[in-house]
Image (spheres, coloured by chain):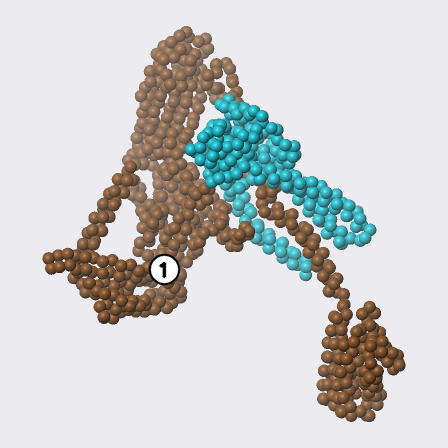
Amino acid sequence: MGLSVLSMLSMRALTLFLATSTLLFATAAFGQGTTFTARAGRNPVGVGEAFPFDINLSANNARMENYQPPDFRGFRIVAQQPSQSTQIQMGGGGGFMRQNYTWHYQLVPLQKGKLTIGQASVRVDGHDLKTEKVNVTVVESGQAPPPPQARQPRGIPGFPGSSFFFPDLDSDEPPPPPPQPEPARAAGRRNFLRVAPSKTRAFVGEQITVEWFLYLTERQNNYAPTKEPHTDGFWSEELDVPQNRGGLSLSEQVLDGRVYLSAPLMRKAIFGLRPGKYTITPLEADISRVDFFGSTLRSEHLKADPVTLEVVPLPAGAPAGFDSSAVGKLMLTAEVDRDHVQVGDAITLKLRLEGEGNLRKIPLPTLPRLDGWKVYEPKVSVQINHADVIGGSKVAEYLLLPERPGQTTLPPFFFSYFDTQKAAYATAKTNPIPLTVTGQAMAVQSTQAPAATATPGASASENLLALDVRPLRTRPSLRRDVGSLLYQSPALLGVVIAPPLLLGLVGAVGFARTRLGRETEGKRLRKLRRSANKRLRTATSLLQENRLAHSLGEIERVLSEFLTGKVGRPVSGMSRDELRAALGRLGAGKALSETTVGTLDICDRARFAPGDLNQEEASRAIDRASEILEAFEKLPSTAGGAA
Amino acid sequence: MRRWLLSAILAALVLILAPAVPARADFLDQAWKRGNDAFLRGDYAGAAAAYEQLDRQHAVSADLYYNLGVTYFRMGHLGPAIWAFERALVIAPDDEDARFNLNQARKLADQHARDKMEGAEREPLWTRVVSYFGPSTEVWLFCGLYLGCFALLFLRRRTTEDSRLAISTAAAVLGGVALFAGVLLLGRMELDRIPYAVVLPDTIAVKEGADATFRTSFQVHAGLRLRVLEREQDWVRVRLANGLEGFVRSEDLGLL
């Protein structure tokens, strides 16, 4: 309801503002001629940081054509949006129409230094207009001053320009603290965590709301907090955090000219226990992106900044019996379920404290001793509202058992607290409650019974143990079931697949090694051919150096090795006839056999009578050897099995 | 060279995994402690919130669900308490405390309302067999035997001809038992394909179709175990032990 009234007021104010602005602007505009200007939204700006750049054309009843954007060299255009508006004014002298054209650009500088955005041009009523060149100073990322007002479509406390950091305190309260330095963030950084306390200074027992937000430059698949902030020196309560079906509630936010996906992660209401300065340790979390199969593509560890808060003592003048945790806005009531009872019938007295404050810690007033009544230990229940401000109710249920007839008056209960809104101490008081007891007095003496486990409705001598469960497990750390975790994890599939895969792989590698280790016929011949070619080259070079004996020695080795390989046994020890027979078995014709033997004879001559040879003969022997090798290569080998 | 490579891979794995595991453990332990502290000072809602946070973080722990059950019980939420104790027993079937508390919660729930089922069939033998052990026991049994079998097969490649027969026999025995454990595990997976769930609110109306406007077929009460057959947006089709079927909102059920 209140919100809708506020909205209506805001709408009216906005309408009025717009109307006034339009009128003023129109009045001013009609007095002007045609303007064509360019303006950078920020200057200087950091490398990689987006900033707005606007080109505006304003003209009276003009025809605009042929707009040419400026040269944005050194910048990347991340967004552009033209817009047009027309203002019309009717008057005694006739109508005026003024048109405004704006080209909005969102630019990102790509390099550091002084960059110049060129001139934009346009033709208006046949006249060419140009904007001035605009110089933009581009500094290191993160060193540019923040924009004067960051756009904030959905409010998150703690943003620049927000007063949420330092709420006003009354003059008699402690003076507001100096502004805490903004934590390093955003500009130049990618994903980050941000902490935003509602205030940095508070009274003992006063609520400070601390919120942690996640800022992402792009959507992530996983978010896992790894370290919770420690709030030593404070009483801490968790506050509700909006979530989408168990996930983070991401929304777009613009911070320092950059668009982020932001989500609230954690909210805590903390209450200072003692005066002093305390530091809330950072929240740490891991974010990651995964691929289609769930494998992590990229992960990042994020850490928020620590935040230091000051807790100041409450003002002097606290009333007697005041407890320092009783801070907030509170109300006390007392009621009985009936005020007329028989001796032996129980009355239930409910003492209820409700409102805003750290109700869990605030003690309730105690019931004084009542003569003629047996009073059981109260059953205390607390109902806490975890929305924005911690509050709710705390109820003490006393079971009162009258032991003799008569009139009794339950005295008023007093409760003192520090009202943070009024910044003053206050005392709540309940009304006295008259009770009437009828019937015969009981024989049992009145005592203050420590019957904490007694069940309402049970007689005084009976200790009824109600249906209950076994107690909580309070191990210091959570014992996780790794087996069940493995059962639910895709890693189990890995455990199943990996061993046979590995065994198969080892087998395959062994098999391949065996196969590769075995020398096949083709492989052996290729090897022979390679060796032969090498020796022929050596023989040729020796021939060129006129070392005929050496050259023909190489030829002999070539032929011997090659033929040994083909025949399957050494040919060097064979007689010429044995060699002819062996070559014949290979399928060599008589001519080839004789050529081979003849070439080998020449080589023998070179060994035993080197002076008999000339260069031409040696050269022919090399050529022949080459031909012999080629010819034998074409013949099937008998060495396959014998080699 | 090979040993050096293996050492490097192991060192890299340790370096990658070591910081992540304690960090998560630290966080889970903090939430666990926060839940316990809240419970002990009487803040059951705070305790439940901390334990539920652990549940959302997929912290599989019988202790977690045990404590969550005790907390729900203290809050008077019997349906969720029964679900939590059942969940603890799924993880650790031999958890005596969880079984005792489950019975207590069921007794108390029966005092409010009891679903007496006509013609309810006993669960088939294979279901009872595969759920006799917890998933953890089955997983460890299977992994131990399976990996042991393959370890022997690897070893067999390295040994002499004389000892190969003995190793082969041992591997075959391990493989056979691993096969049995694997069948148990597959049976559990099959069982989980049509999961059990527990009714959370005190009473829910089971509809004939997946919409609140459909006619109510029958009512069920907190703590009743049923099976979830299929999901249709925010509704699920459920089947009772006696074969009755209908649709309920998914938020009214706690999956086991």
Q: Locate residue A24, reporting x and y percent.
A: 18, 55
Q: Locate residue A354, reporting x and y percent.
A: 36, 29
For label 1, the crowd category at 10 Å Cα-Cα, with few meaning under 14, some 14 to 19 and many 20 or more, is few
Query: Which residue has dot 1 on it?
Result: A79
Q: Amino acid at mark 1?
A: Ala
Seen at 52% across and 38% down, the residue is: B230
* Rendering quarter of residue A319: top left
- The answer to which of A488 and A421 lies nearer the viewer is A488
Which chain is assigned brown? A
Q: Quadrant of the N terminus of chain A?
A: top left
Q: Quadrant of the C terminus of chain A?
A: bottom right
Q: Judge from the rendering whether residue A637 lies leftward or rightward of residue B213; answer left or right.
A: right
The chain letter for the residue carrying disc 1 is: A
- The answer to which of A534 and A344 lies nearer the viewer is A534
Whether residue A614 can be seen here: yes
Would you place residue B9 above or below residue A615 in this image?
A: above
Seen at 47% across and 32% down, the residue is: B207
Seen at 43% across and 33% down, the residue is: B212
Residue at the extreme top: A440
Whether residue B100 can be seen here: no
Q: Locate residue B93, reporting x and y percent.
A: 61, 33
* Rendering quarter of residue A377: top left
Q: Judge from the rendering whether residue A247 lies leftward or rightward of residue A626; answer left or right.
A: left
- The answer to which of B115 and A584 lies nearer the viewer is A584
Would you place residue A524 above or below residue B53 in this image?
A: below
Which chain is assigned cyan? B
Q: Judge from the rendering whether residue B40 lies leftward or rightward of residue A330; answer left or right.
A: right
